[in-house]
Image (cartoon, rainbow, N blue to C red):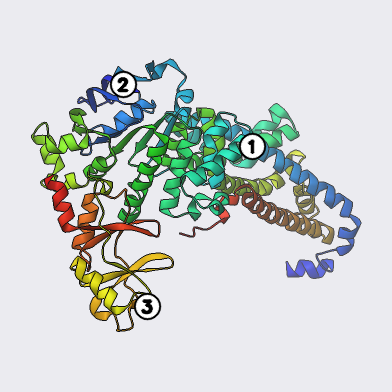
Amino acid sequence: MIDLEDLTKVFPGTAAPAVDQLTLHIERGEIAVFVGPSGCGKTTTLKMINRLVEPTSGTIRIDGRSVESVPVHELRREIGYVIQQIGLFPHRTIRQNMATVPGLLNWDKQRTAERVDELAELVALDPDMLDRYPPELSGGQRQRVGVARALAADPPVLLMDEPFGAVDPIIRAHLQDELLDLQKRLRKTIALVTHDIDEAIKMGDRVAILSEGGHLEQYGAPADILRDPANAFVADFLGTDRGIKRLSLIPISDLDLETGPVVDRSATHAEAVAVALEYGTEWIAVRDSVGVNGWIRIADVPSSGPAAVDTEPFQTRLTTNSTLKEALDAIVSSHTSVAAVFDGSELLGMITAGAVSREILR
Amino acid sequence: MIVFVQATGGFFSWEWVVNHLDDIWDRTVQHLMLTAIAIAIGIVISLALSVVALRFRWTYAPITWFTGILYTIPSLALFAFLVPVTGLSVLTAEIGLVSYTLLILIRNMVAGIDGVPPATVESARGMGYTDRGLFFAVELPLALPVIIAGVRIASVTTIGLVTITALIGQGGLGFFILRGLNLFYSPVGTTQIVVGTVVSVALAVAVDLSLVGVERLATPWSRRRATA
């Protein structure tokens, strides 16, 4: 879908190239992540794709067509672009921001309005937000709007420059999940730049590791790179916890979840104890009319059963998008020593430490 | 002065004011017209020069240098130089008035557009705005508060300067001030000086306030405060 060939950029006034003879192919519908230390030319490479930076030599083709074959503003209208600072227009409402590219393409009013509503739904943005101005939104909401705006005219290609760099780690993880979820449905061809190797491993179908001066050190699927780093630079960049990082590539959906010690609100004391014994736990999870929302120590269950007791919430609620790494983290940091996996409010099941090690050894 | 007031029996004549309301109105309108034309032409010229300065950065220094010199020429001298060429005309008045607006307007326009966040500009380019589209749809609106701040200063300055143009037969309310001075502080003279001054100051305040209103209407986004 995107072909970079012998791409070189030497900025005026500098001797060393920022990007040096880079050749790389991005498959249609895949996320390719460019990662490396600062000064490795990853952002420069990205900006050459939509010609915000003009290459010194080499070619870029999208769908076999050179990016230089169309006027630059037309090229950019067909490529979604998301940057770290998002760059929403502060003088326009969220709705107007999202309608930017449709506006440039002269869509009629109704089509644009319908598309904006569709986009708000796509990125899970409260429609009440649409008539506000960007400074009135939180960082996470602004980032969603940035993605929605980039997707407005349904471009086949999306360029993302540190798209989650400006939000705090919790929201970042959440937005990463959302993007992966979105990508499952939309199948865009995405080039994403980050300095965070964990983000690269999590987001990338393929990861390009660049070293200073824009040298491509390795390009491949994250699992392959982690298993078999091409050289010392790559191994060093991946870090000493390469093994643990591999955990982040195994999705929870690969595991068979255990039901776990779950009893109904209406259960008797004896039933609760029996379930706890069966699973060898000192606690039970309690199911009430809205689903499973928490757990109780078996010692705290009164003789009348769990009906009247307040439950402790699960510290971490994983989803099927979560990875074994997150599961392991939930396990070691919870009182219950399990990771609870939810689909919305519905408990899908639990993962134990034993299940994690069985999966690694497999 | 006190002796003088005693000798002439008061220094302000309400009777003169009441008898000359039409006259005062006409001169006020003339004053506003001279100001409005100067500001309008000043904005057009400044916008053009600002675009040049922003596009070719090296021209910014000479442009501010040149308009700075215009700004420092004493107005009296400027009109004296112009009269032999363009006569005692509105044109002479406007050449002077416009000259004095340029430095303020250009500085604020360039500063306003320089103040647009780089990320906003980059994302606009990345989405496919042309240079022209970027300027009119993004940079100019975002620079508006700073530009209007410049227009306010230029307007107030110009309203004051218009009175000087009375010397070349224009002057708006300056006409009364000049005539008052020529009447050697008779009650009719001082009354005219006071009327010319007070209405001119009131005009400056009114124009300044209405420009604040214009800014609020033109930049609805800046009134909303961040909630998160």
Between label 2 and label 3, give the one nearer the viewer. Answer: 3
The residue at the far left in this view is: A232
The kind of residue tagged 3 is Ala
Tell me the SS state at disc 3. helix
The answer to which of marks 2 and 3 sits earlier in the sequence is: 2
Q: CA distance from mark 2 to mark 1?
A: 36 Å
Query: Which subunit holds the residue at mark 1?
Result: A
Kindly identify which numbered label has been placed on residue A110: 1
Task: Please give left or right for residue B30 compared with residue B217 in the image.
Answer: right
Viewer-proximal residue among A294 and A191: A294
Residue drawn at x 60%, y 31% as measured from the top left? A107
Q: Position of residue B128 (x, y in %)?
A: 48, 29
Kindly identify which numbered label has been placed on residue A307: 3
Determine which residue is flagged by label 2: A3
Task: Please give left or right for residue A341 compared with residue B132 in the image.
Answer: left
The kind of residue tagged 2 is Asp
- Place residue A116 in its image quadrant: top right
